């Protein structure tokens, strides 16, 4: 548990939350361009049946994260594949996308420099990741060889002569 003090009205209260919750509070307040104190005050101003302030904050963050996960998991993702000057799009709702030469992969790449099971794209409920599956020729993200790395929209993953772009 980690403690932070917060002024509410004329009194100061101490809030004890696990570090992961404080990280989420900090991330969200930064995204909104406000202090963590202001963000927490906004959370505590919302109507709730929970009287314990720390439990109220945790509950709010968990519900928000669950709602965001639900929204993201119902959206499709589009990947642009450029292989030997042939470009095509793949749209999927999957949370795991296996890529390689083998016909059993979700995305099959006809490129001799690509391993049978070359890489895996994984959605962890918040972000997409690329994982190299110990391929012979490696996996590159924006020109840098990676083993595991979080993806952003527009990133280019290169395997052999093939480029995969997260749209």
Image (cartoon, rainbow, N blue to C red):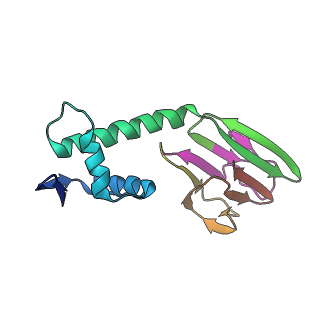
Extreme residue in the left direction? 11
Q: Can residue 117 be found in the magenta stretch?
A: yes
Residue 85 seen in this snapshot: yes
Q: Is residue 18 left or right of residue 69?
A: left
In the depicted structure, whether residue 34 falls above or below residue 97: below
Nearest the camera: 97 or 42? 42
Q: Can residue 153 be found in the magenta stretch?
A: no
Q: Main secondary structure of the magenta part?
A: loop
Residue 138 picture location, percent across and down: 67, 63
The residue shown at (26%, 49%) is 41
The residue shown at (30%, 54%) is 38
Extreme residue in the front direction? 10
In the depicted structure, whether residue 8 falls above or below residue 104: below
Nearest the camera: 4 or 17? 4
In the depicted structure, whether residue 2 falls above or below residue 69: below
Nearest the camera: 48 or 112? 48
Residue 167 picture location, percent across and down: 69, 47
Residue 113 picture location, percent across and down: 78, 59
Q: Where is residue 115, by image quadrant?
A: bottom right
Residue 102 seen in this snapshot: no
The residue shown at (38%, 55%) is 29
Residue 140 picture location, percent across and down: 67, 63
Q: Is residue 151 left or right of residue 42?
A: right
The residue shown at (41%, 59%) is 30
Q: Which residues are magenta?
A: 98-124
Extreme residue in the right direction? 85
Q: Quadrant of the N terminus?
A: bottom left
Q: Exactly how many numbered labels are in the figure? A: 0
């Amino acid at each position: 548990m980690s403690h932070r003090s917060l002024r509410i009205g004329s009194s100061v209260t101490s809030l004890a939350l696990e570090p992961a919750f404080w990280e989420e509070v900090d991330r969200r307040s930064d995204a909104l361009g406000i202090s963590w104190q202001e963000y927490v005050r906004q959370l505590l101003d919302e109507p709730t049946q929970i009287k314990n302030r720390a439990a109220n904050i945790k509950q709010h963050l968990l519900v928000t994260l669950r709602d965001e996960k639900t929204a993201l998991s119902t959206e499709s993702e589009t990947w642009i594949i450029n292989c030997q000057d042939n470009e095509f799009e793949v749209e999927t709702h999957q949370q795991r996308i296996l890529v390689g030469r083998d016909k059993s992969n979700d995305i099959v790449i006809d490129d001799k420099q690509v391993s049978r099971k070359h890489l895996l794209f994984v959605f962890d409920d918040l972000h997409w990741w690329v994982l190299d599956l110990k391929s012979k020729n490696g996996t590159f993200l924006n020109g840098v060889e990676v083993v595991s790395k979080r993806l952003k929209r527009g990133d280019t993953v290169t395997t052999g002569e093939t480029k995969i772009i997260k749209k």
